[in-house]
Amino acid sequence: MASLRNADTQLRTYIRQHSLPHIYEALLCSLCVMCPENPLEFLEEKIKQMIEKGDSALMWDVFIDESKKPRIRAMAGSYLEYFFGQDEDQLVSPELFKKAYSFYISNLQRLYFDAWIAYCSMRKAAKLSTQLKLQTAQAHHTSRLLKSIVHCWNTWVKFRMTQQTLAASRIQNVFNKAFMKKIFKAWNAETQDSKKKKEYFERLEKGDMDDYQDLNSLTGKDSEDDVSQLPLKVALKIFVHVDLIDLARCAQVCRSWKIITQNSSLWSSIDLSSVRHCIQDKFVVDILRKCRPYVIRLNLRSCSTLHWRTFKGISECKNLQDLNMSDCQNLNDESMKIICEGCPGLLYLNVSHTNITNASLRMISRFLFNLQYLSLAYSRKFTDKGLQYLGSGKGAHKLIYLDLSGCTQISVDGFRYIAGCYSLQQLELNDMFTLTDNCVIVLLEKCQNITSVSLLGSPHLTDAAFKVLAQGRKLVKIRLEGNHRITDVSIKTISKSCPSLKHIYLADCQKITDIGLKTVSSLKNITVLNVADCIRISDPGVRQVVEGTSGTKIREINLTNCLRVSDLSLLRIAQKCHNITFLSLRYCENVTDSGIELLGNIASLISIDLSGTSITDQGLSALGANSKIKELGVSECVGISDIGIQKFCQQSKDLEQLDISHCLHVTNSTVKSVTFCCKMLTSVSIAGCPKVTDLSIQYISGVCCYLHALDISGCVHLSDRALKHLRKGCRQLRVLRMLYCKSISKAAVVKLESKIKKLEYSSDDPPPWFGYDQHGNILISVSHLDETEDEMVDKSANLFSQESVDIL
């Protein structure tokens, strides 16, 4: 509402003269307090009173009854005086009123807030003081409790330590007694065994044992059947390693063994290749009829006597997954048709060395939808048309492995058809002397998933084929042999494009040099390196490989006939290759005892071949420090004698394979030392040792009960008596070579032939390169030739060492 302070002066004078503010104030206050029922009549009545009595000394409560008048009086003028502009003479204006009230309220709030702050501060201080006191009390209580707990725990620990010490001492005493018993028992057994061997050898040397009696027959203790008492699962794990013939023999031992041998898990994998010479259709059909629900793997390799009945029985094995019919001469297209129709679940199929034609390949592509592994090696009656069936049919879409080794009838078109097998990962093309660059290029245009390729015996391939092979592929394994056209360029391309390469086989590649091995050193996952017969490889190349990023991962190195390799390479191998298990240094003539001694410190080395090297007894003795060696080859090492072999065998008693052939100094004493120390021998070669007699064979047959392979070719002093010892002593002998054994008769060989899987025999005179005549006398010309060769080796070694220096 606006004020009349700025109104006209006459108007303001008029209002003041007639006391209009007081009139309005009295009337309004009376209305507000009295609240009459009829305000208009009330106002009319009061106005009449004012006319009668006058408006002088008119107060604001003049029209209010005495009972309703308020007791509190106003401090200043009314708002109407302010409205009508009649308050100039008053000291307290509404603005001052507001300011006074605001000041009063703010002071009051400040006073209250200060009092509240003080109160809160006091409460907070009291609370903090209480918390400090509680924390101090809690800490004191905790410390006292911890002291009590630690004291109790310490007492308990001392008590337990005393008890544990006492128990440990008792357990240690019991362990020591049991351990000593074991030691004494083992020592006693070893002593008794050595004593029996010694007595056996002495009786052999004295000639007291004319009639054969092996070492195991000297014990008169009857054997007990512990196998029948074993749990069935354990017994099955034992019988699963037994071949078919021995399994049939085991079934005739007793009833419990027969029950075990009839378990289905033993017949899920049937290998008939071991009895291929005497197997008949009726026997195979009977086995397949009984076991056809659970036959998964079937091996009929080289079973040439099998005919249609057997192939018909194979087709009834619906769960068959692995079938090997390699070298089955009676296998034809009709047989393949019925097998493919009856065994659609085949995953592995080997029909190498057979007479199958294009019709068989057509059946394979039509019915075998899940086939993953297929071998057609050396099957030369199919043509490019058959490969067209294979590449375009439904059965080749999952093919991962394909072996076409020796199939020289395949042309470029045939390889183009094979390219239709997009899933191919492993490819075998060995012994393909007709293989050219175009064949490989058209094959690899569409097969982008190749990870492993084998091209052994492919001499016409050049760098162009390997350039295509390396493009856009993740090769893991490459095998190449006998190629004199491939150069370091191919090795560089493959190493650069295939960083995942693990297996490198480059045997007899004459143009490969140290530069190629330098590119190989950049690969990070090399595990197998074979550069045999690469005569340009020398110490710098080997050093770069073993010092590369994959040096610690290499497990196999083959440096056969690498004439430039010397002890320096062996030093690098011993320093860097901590996981190597196989090492071949055959005919590395610059390798001496100094380098061999370094190899004795490689704990992981299991197999080593030092044939044709300059190793002597000293180096062989130092190599024996590695007691984990299981395979040793020292053939044609003229510096080896009885002493070196004896010292080696005394340290490496776990030796399983030994080749000491063509070591002219080997005698019966050597064989005696070997058989006395190494009980676990499975393969022994003493071919070309003219000083070996029947006594050595008697040593072997009397002790080596695990022997599987034996080569005695050129042992001219062996007679029929040696075969008699082998027939009665070496019951597990499977391979026997007896070439140039003139003193052994054909009749004795025929008696032994039925018990040996693979036997080679000839009664011809030893060839001149054996170094001795038919009577075992050393040839003078050979000794002279050895001296000449030594001089040539010295000259070549000097030349090679100079070239190595130049390369470095």
Image (cartoon, rainbow, N blue to C red):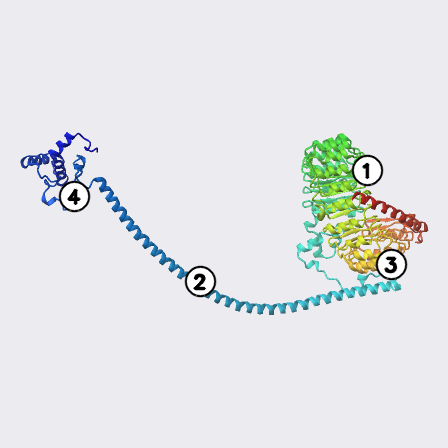
Q: CA distance from mark 1 to mark 2?
A: 88 Å
Q: Confirm or deny contact between disc 1 and disc 2 (CB under 8 A).
A: no
On residue 484, the disc is: 1
Residue at which label 4 appears: 74
Question: Between residues 111 and 623, which one lies in front from this camera angle?
Answer: 111
Q: Which class describes the residues within 10 Å of circle 3: few (<14), some (14-19), or many (20+)?
A: some
Q: Which class describes the residues within 10 Å of circle 4: few (<14), some (14-19), or many (20+)?
A: few
On residue 668, the disc is: 3
Q: Which class describes the residues within 10 Å of circle 1: few (<14), some (14-19), or many (20+)?
A: some
Quadrant in which the N terminus appears = top left
Q: Confirm or deny contact between disc 4 and disc 1 (CB under 8 A).
A: no
Q: Three-letter amino acid code at disc 2?
A: Ala
Mark in front: 4 vs 1: 4
Instruction: Tell me what residue is drawn at x 63 percent, y 69 percent.
Output: 169
- Of labels 4 and 1, earlier in sequence is 4
- Of labels 4 and 3, earlier in sequence is 4
Q: CA distance from mark 4 to mark 1?
A: 131 Å
Is 29 placed left or right of 386 in the picture? Answer: left
Question: Between residues 166 and 496, which one lies in front from this camera angle?
Answer: 496
Mark in front: 3 vs 2: 2
Q: Three-letter amino acid code at disc 1?
A: His
Q: Confirm or deny contact between disc 1 and disc 3 (CB under 8 A).
A: no
Rendering coords of residue 590 (x, y %): 83, 49
Residue at which label 2 appears: 139
Q: Three-letter amino acid code at disc 4?
A: Ala
> Tag 3, which secondary structure?
helix
